[in-house]
C-alpha cells in the first residue's frame, strides 16, 4: 500500500471551526480566517458557530429548535455572509456538523420533527454551498434499540437529502458515548442497512479508539448497551477487521476526522462527567482531545496513527479533517487561540505524513537502510526513528508550516517523544 508523501499530500485537508476556540470572543469569522491562514483549503462549519454569528448580527435572534423552527431567514442571511467570507479566504465548506438525536424513533410526530429540522439545515447547507451533512449517532437513552428502525429513519433522511438541489450526502459518525451505535462496526452495519448511495460514514480516530480504551481501563459508567455483539477486545484485531471490512466499500467512507485523546485518570474523569451530568466519554471528548504529537499539559496517547494506517490500507484517499477539543487552552479569552490551534494542526498534519511515509518503502534518497531510517518497531509500540528531522523538515517546508512560535520543534520529534502505551 502506497503511504508515500507523494500519495498522501494529495488528500484534501480541513479544519473544523468548533476546534478553533471555545471562548465567546472566538468568533466564526476569526476562526475561518485562522483556518485559511494556516494553509487549509477546507473547513467543517459547526452549526453552533453559525448560530452564534447570527446572534451577533441580529439582536434577539431565535435559535433553531428541534423542529427546525426559529429565525430561519436570519440564519440563512448569516450563512450567505459566511459563504462569501469563505470565498474571499479561499475556503470550501466540507461539511456542516453536528446534526444529532435523529434516529431510533417509531413515533410519527418525532420522526416528522426530525425531518423538519433536517430541512432547515439543508437550506443552511445550500447557502454555504456545502453538499455534506455530518450526523452523529444518538445518545438519547429513550430511543429504540432496533437497527432496522434506525436504518429506516436514516433512509428517510438520506432520501430527503438526495432530493435537494444540489443533492446532499449524509456522513454518519459513531459517537463513542452514543446509546446503541458506538463503534465503527455498528455504523458500518447501519450503513449497510440504509443502503443509499448518498449515505456514508465519517470515521474518527478518537471515537474509534476511545470506546476500546474505555473497556481496557474499565472507565466507570462509560459502556452503553448495544443490541449487537461487542467488537473484538483487541484493538489491533479491530483495526485489521476495519481494513478488511472497508476495502471493498471505500466509497462508503465520506471523510476521516483526526484527533488524539489525553491520558486522564479514569475516576477523575468520571467525577467530572457526573458533575456535568453527561456520559464520561462525552466529557472526555469535549475537553481532552489534543492534536496528535502536540505538546500540551495533557498530551495525547491514543493510537491515532494505527487508526489512520488501517483506514488508508483500504485504499481510500478521501478528505481528512482535524477536529480537536482541548478546553484548558481553547476556553481562554485569548485572541491568538484560533491561529495557534490551526497552525499547530498543520504542523501535526506534516508530522503524521512523515510518520506514515516511514511505513512505506519509498526511496527517500538518503542511502540509508530502511531498518535504520524507519527504525525498529519494538515492544510497547515505541519507535526508534533516526533522521526523522530530515523528512519532517522536507514535508514542513512543502506545507509551509515551519514558523516561529510553533509548539512543534525538530528536537521534540526524536524517538523519545514517540510513544504509544
Image (tube, rainbow, N blue to C red):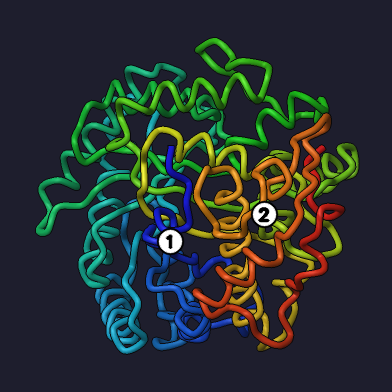
The residue pinned by badge 1 equals: 9
| Disc 2 element | helix
Q: Residue at x 48, y 23 (%)?
A: 185
Depth check, front residue: 83 or 242? 242
The residue pinned by badge 2 equals: 286
| Disc 1 element | loop
Numbered disc in front, either 2 or 1: 1
Left or right of residue 267, residue 142 in this image:
left
Left or right of residue 51, residue 383 in this image:
right
Q: Residues within 10 Å of mark 1 (few under 14, many from 20)?
A: some
Depth check, front residue: 4 or 335? 4
Q: Position of residue 240 (x, y in %)?
A: 54, 23
Q: Quadrant of residue 6?
A: bottom left
Q: Earlier in the sequence, mark 2 or mark 1?
A: 1
Q: Quadrant of the C terminus?
A: top right
221 up-or-down from 25: above or below: above
Q: Residue at x 21, y 52 (%)?
A: 168
399 up-or-down from 174: above or below: below
Depth check, front residue: 25 or 404? 404
Left or right of residue 237, residue 42 in this image:
left
Amino acid at each position: 500500500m502506497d503511504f508515500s508523501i507523494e500519495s498522501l499530500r494529495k488528500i484534501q485537508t480541513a479544519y473544523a471551526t468548533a476546534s478553533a476556540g471555545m471562548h465567546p470572543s472566538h468568533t466564526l469569522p476569526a476562526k475561518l480566517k485562522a483556518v485559511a491562514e494556516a494553509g487549509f483549503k477546507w473547513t467543517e462549519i459547526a452549526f453552533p458557530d453559525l448560530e452564534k454569528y447570527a446572534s451577533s448580527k441580529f439582536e434577539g435572534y431565535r435559535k433553531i429548535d428541534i423542529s427546525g423552527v426559529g429565525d430561519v431567514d436570519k440564519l440563512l442571511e448569516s450563512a450567505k455572509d459566511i459563504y462569501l467570507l469563505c470565498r474571499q479566504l479561499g475556503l470550501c465548506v466540507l461539511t456542516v456538523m453536528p446534526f444529532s438525536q435523529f434516529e431510533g424513533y417509531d413515533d410519527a410526530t418525532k420522526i416528522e420533527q426530525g425531518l423538519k429540522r433536517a430541512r432547515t439545515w439543508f437550506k443552511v447547507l445550500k447557502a454555504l454551498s456545502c453538499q455534506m451533512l455530518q450526523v452523529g449517532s444518538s445518545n438519547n437513552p429513550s430511543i429504540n434499540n432496533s437497527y432496522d428502525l434506525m436504518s429506516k429513519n436514516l433512509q428517510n433522511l438520506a432520501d430527503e437529502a438526495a432530493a435537494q438541489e444540489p443533492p446532499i450526502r449524509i456522513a454518519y459518525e459513531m459517537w463513542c458515548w452514543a446509546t446503541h451505535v458506538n463503534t465503527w462496526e455498528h455504523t458500518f452495519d447501519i450503513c449497510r442497512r440504509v443502503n443509499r448511495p448518498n449515505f456514508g460514514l465519517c470515521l474518527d480516530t478518537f471515537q474509534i479508539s476511545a470506546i476500546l480504551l474505555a473497556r481496557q481501563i474499565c472507565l466507570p459508567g462509560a459502556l452503553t448497551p448495544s443490541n449487537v455483539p461487542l467488537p473484538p477486545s483487541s484493538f489491533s484485531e479491530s483495526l485489521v477487521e476495519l481494513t478488511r471490512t472497508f476495502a471493498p466499500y471505500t466509497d462508503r467512507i465520506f471523510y476521516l476526522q483526526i484527533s488524539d485523546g489525553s491520558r486522564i485518570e479514569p475516576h477523575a474523569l468520571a467525577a467530572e462527567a457526573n458533575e456535568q451530568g453527561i456520559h464520561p466519554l462525552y466529557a472526555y471528548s469535549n475537553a481532552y482531545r489534543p492534536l496528535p504529537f502536540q505538546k500540551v499539559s495533557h498530551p495525547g496517547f491514543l493510537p491515532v496513527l494505527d487508526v489512520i494506517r488501517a483506514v488508508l490500507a483500504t485504499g481510500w484517499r478521501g478528505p481528512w479533517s482535524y477536529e480537536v477539543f482541548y478546553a484548558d487552552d481553547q476556553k481562554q479569552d485569548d485572541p491568538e487561540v484560533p491561529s495557534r490551534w490551526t497552525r499547530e494542526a498543520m504542523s501535526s498534519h506534516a508530522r503524521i505524513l512523515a510518520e506514515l511515509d516511514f511505513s512505506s518503502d519509498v526511496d527517500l534518497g538518503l542511502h540509508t537502510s530502511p531498518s535504520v531510517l524507519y527504525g525498529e518497531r519494538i515492544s510497547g509500540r515505541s519507535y526508534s526513528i533516526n533522521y526523522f528531522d530530515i523528512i519532517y523538515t522536507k514535508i514542513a517546508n512543502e506545507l509551509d508550516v515551519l514558523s516561529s512560535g510553533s509548539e512543534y520543534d525538530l528536537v521534540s520529534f526524536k524517538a523519545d517523544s514517540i510513544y504509544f502505551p
